[in-house]
Amino acid sequence: MQTLELARIYERQGYYEDAFEIYSFLCMQKTDNQESFNEISAGLKRMEKKIKKKGHEVQGAYPEENISRLCEKWLTLMVLKHRFDKFKKVKSRLLQR
């Protein structure tokens, strides 16, 4: 659910990278509404400035450029899930004794 409203919420809450990703996604979508397109473009520019001000690199305006970062996140989550599952098995064995 990548919507303009969600991007605005992330922006207000200070989640600039997440807002930037949504604005980028929306920018790639075809829209006939010029007002929405202008707001999306302005949002992208604001997020770029805020992210750079925080000292972070902007990941890129296109989802393809974020694939390696997303894969890394996915792998990290998979490892954590595996560890958690092993922990649950050990815990259940200890409780059975």
Image: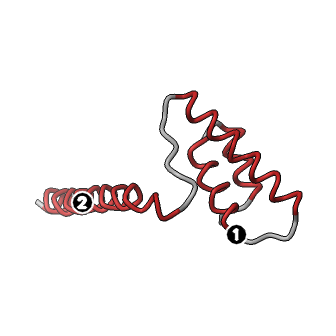
How packed mark 1 is, by other alpha carbons closer than 10 Å (few <14, some 14-19, many 20 or more), is: few
For mark 1, give the secondary structure: loop
Q: Amino acid at mark 1?
A: Gln
Tell me the number on the disc at residue 95.
none
**Figure quadrant of residue 31:** bottom right
| 2 or 1: mark nearer the eye | 1
Q: Earlier in the sequence, mark 2 or mark 1?
A: 1
Q: Which residue is mark 1?
A: 29
- Comparing 79 with 2, the one in front is 2
In this image, 33 relative to 62: left or right?
right
Question: Gap in Å between the C-alphas at discs 2 and 1?
Answer: 43 Å
**Figure quadrant of residue 45:** top right
Q: Is residue 84 above or below residue 43?
A: below
Q: Residue at x 21, y 56 (%)?
A: 87
For mark 2, give the secondary structure: helix
Q: Residue at x 20, y 56 (%)?
A: 91
- Comparing 83 with 93, the one in front is 83
Looking at the picture, how far across and down is residue 28, in whole percent? 66, 65
Q: Which residue is mark 2?
A: 88
Q: Residue at x 80, y 59 (%)?
A: 37
The N terminus lies in quadrant: bottom right
Looking at the picture, how far across and down is residue 68, in whole percent? 37, 59
Q: Amino acid at mark 2?
A: Lys
As drawn, the residue found furthest toward the left would be: 97
In this image, 54 relative to 11: left or right?
left
The C terminus lies in quadrant: bottom left
